[in-house]
Every structure is written in structure tokens, then in C-alpha cells.
Image (cartoon, rainbow, N blue to C red):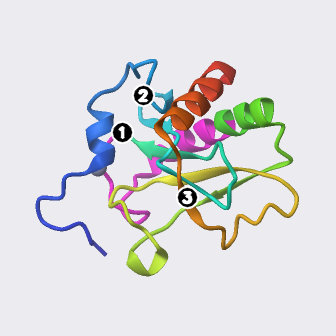
Amino acid sequence: MKHAPAGYACPFCGIAASLPSPAPESAVVLVDDNVYALVPTHHYGGIKGNCLLIPRAHYENVLDIPDSLGADFFRATRRLAQAMRDVFQCEGISTRQHNGPAGDQDVWHFHLHVFPRYSEDGLHGGKKVPYTTEERIDLAASLRAALH
Ligand SMILES: [Zn+2]
């Protein structure tokens, strides 16, 4: 199940190549040995502060990722969830992960969406809306400062 076109210029590998030191003005939130997280270009249903958690090495989808990344993903998901709770006082956290065109994947490098949630917030079916660059930078800075 491979869908990346030949010569795919992978945007997440491009960002990974600039790590481990996220510039203060970047939308990168978390950098670990094997994974990183950022505030993506869009939010959904007006729920701001969502993140993408991404392996630093290139794996296209869930069929490719090694078992050894599991602990890194759970640790980083928990750290993001704690930061979201502290920064946004959200009432819940959701994750979702898409594979293949039929699964709504649109970047061909495995990534996990992490969302702050609120009662009846309309995430499911919520419209995909671009952030401004300033919003992404501000949200990332707030979340970075709350990581522990
Ligand atoms: Zn990649």
C-alpha cells in the first residue's frame, strides 16, 4: 500500500532534517530522539491547538512503522496531551491516524493527529480551516513552554 509518487518531496522529512533545534519562530512543539510534533497548517471545526506527531525517519503508513517506535509515540502523545490540558484547559483529548487515500491520508509520511477536545465541539465532520502563521507560532510556543 504505497501511494507516494516517484520523487515525492516529503514535507515531514524536510522539517525533520532541520531538527533537533526548532527555531523559536517555528511551529514545532516537541523534539525527541525518534519523533517530533508540530502545530499543522490547519485546524478542524475551529478547535485550535491540535498537533501532528511524526516519526523523524520516513515511514509511509501504519503498515511500515517499526514496533520500536511504539513507546516513543505513546510517551510523546502523553506529553502533548498534558500540555494541551494545561494550556487550553480542554476537557478531553482525541487522536486519529489516516492511511491511504481511502483513509483520508494526504501526506505520505505516517503522522498521528492529537486534538484538544471540548463537550460537543464538532470535531467530527468539522471543516478544515487554515491557521495563520502567527497562530501556529503562538500555539506552538505555548505548548512548548508547557511540556514536561
Ligand atoms: Zn518523509
- The amino acid type found where label 3 is placed reads Val
- The amino acid type found where label 2 is placed reads Asp
Q: Is residue 31 above or below residue 120?
A: above
Q: Helix, strand or loop at disc 3? A: strand
Q: Report the side of 11 relative to 6 (left or right).
A: right
Q: Helix, strand or loop at disc 1? A: loop
Location of mark 3 (residue): 129
Q: Is residue 123 magenta?
A: no
Query: Where in the figure is residue 116, as x and y percent of width and height?
Result: 73, 48
Location of mark 1 (residue): 56
Location of mark 2 (residue): 33
Could you tell me which residue is drawn at 63 percent across and 42 percent down? 77
Rendering quarter of residue 143: top right
Of callouts 2 and 1, the N-terminal one: 2
Quadrant into which the C terminus falls: top right
- Tell me how many marks there are: 3
Q: Is residue 59 magenta?
A: yes
- The amino acid type found where label 1 is placed reads Arg
The magenta stretch spans which residues?
A: 56-78
